[in-house]
Image: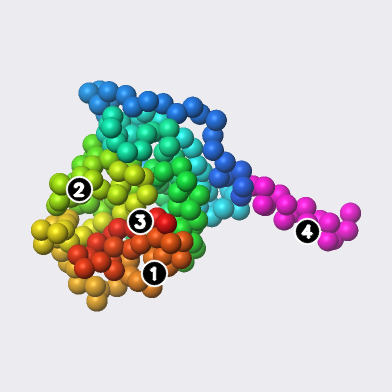
Amino acid sequence: MTASHRRGGIGLAAAVATTLSLLLTSQAPASPASRATARPPAAAQDLPLTATAATTDPIRATIRRVTAADVRYTYRAGCPVPPSRLRAVEMNFRGYDGKVKRGLLIVRDDKAAQTAAIFRAAYLAGFRIRRMDNPNLWYGNDEAMMKADNTSAFNCRRVTGNSSRLSPHSYGTAIDVNTMRNPYRAANGRWYPPNGLRWVDRSLRDAGMIFRTSTITRQVVSRGGIWGGNWYYKDYQHFELG
């Protein structure tokens, strides 16, 4: 075999490995279960730094169908997107402490690959995320989740601070990132979360803060999405996928 053939074989193997990491599992979708039982799952744990070397994809992204347990506290009958159209994107991210952690975002099926690509680019740019746990951990309570500085996506609920509107998160097309360091000003004039008031000052440059020039912002906008930091009522944590 020639050197060029060897190089071609290595490239093909790498491409196959990356493609396989994004394939959907064959698990069948499950209908939502009763909310009356079962504890929410524990938060994600730190991973060894060597974990990212196991694949050509640095964030080791996988996409699978959600289970009833995945959306136990975030879905109810009548929500605009059924569980059959939701996907769990599991991936590595860099914590504020620099350690590699494993997280999960639940988004609509047609936004799953895009979500992985956006967070892969952010990871490669060194962007840091506090945590990326399933909203079940807070029983879907958005205010509690924001106080915990959690990054999340699907959550069928009303807009925090404006209960007359259904949140875009109900459609599986919105993602909130580092909620404490990227606070949100509701239409009622109140900033959420209350422990994020320090970061209303956008002259700060703390890890995990999001700006117009941030890689994650440019990745979303370049795909036709929206960043809430451009709105009159600033929502620095909020992205809507295009």
Task: Tell me: 221 left or right of 12.
Answer: left
Q: Residue at x 33, y 27 (%)?
A: 32
Q: Position of residue 72 (x, y in %)?
A: 30, 31
Q: Mark 4: which secondary structure?
A: helix
Residue named by callout 1:
214
Tell me, yes or no, if residue 92 can be seen here.
no
Residue named by callout 4:
7
Q: Earlier in the sequence, mark 2 or mark 4?
A: 4
Mark 2 vs mark 3: in front: 2
Label number found at residue 240: 3
The residue carrying pointer 2 sits among few (fewer than 14), some (14 to 19) or many (20 or more) residues within 10 Å by Cα, namely few
Q: Position of residue 94 (x, y in %)?
A: 41, 57
Q: Which amino acid type is shown beneath numbered disc 4?
A: Arg
Label number found at residue 5: none
The residue carrying pointer 1 sits among few (fewer than 14), some (14 to 19) or many (20 or more) residues within 10 Å by Cα, namely some
Residue 209 sits in which quadrant? bottom left
Tell me, yes or no, if residue 58 can be seen here.
yes
- Marks 1 and 4: CB-CB under 8 Å? no
Q: Mark 3: which secondary structure?
A: strand
Instruction: Tell me how far mark 1 sits from mark 3, CA to CA.
Output: 15 Å
Q: Earlier in the sequence, mark 3 or mark 4?
A: 4
Magenta stretch in the rendered image: 1-17
Residue named by callout 2:
165
Mark 1 vs mark 3: in front: 3
Q: Which amino acid type is shown beneath numbered disc 2?
A: Arg
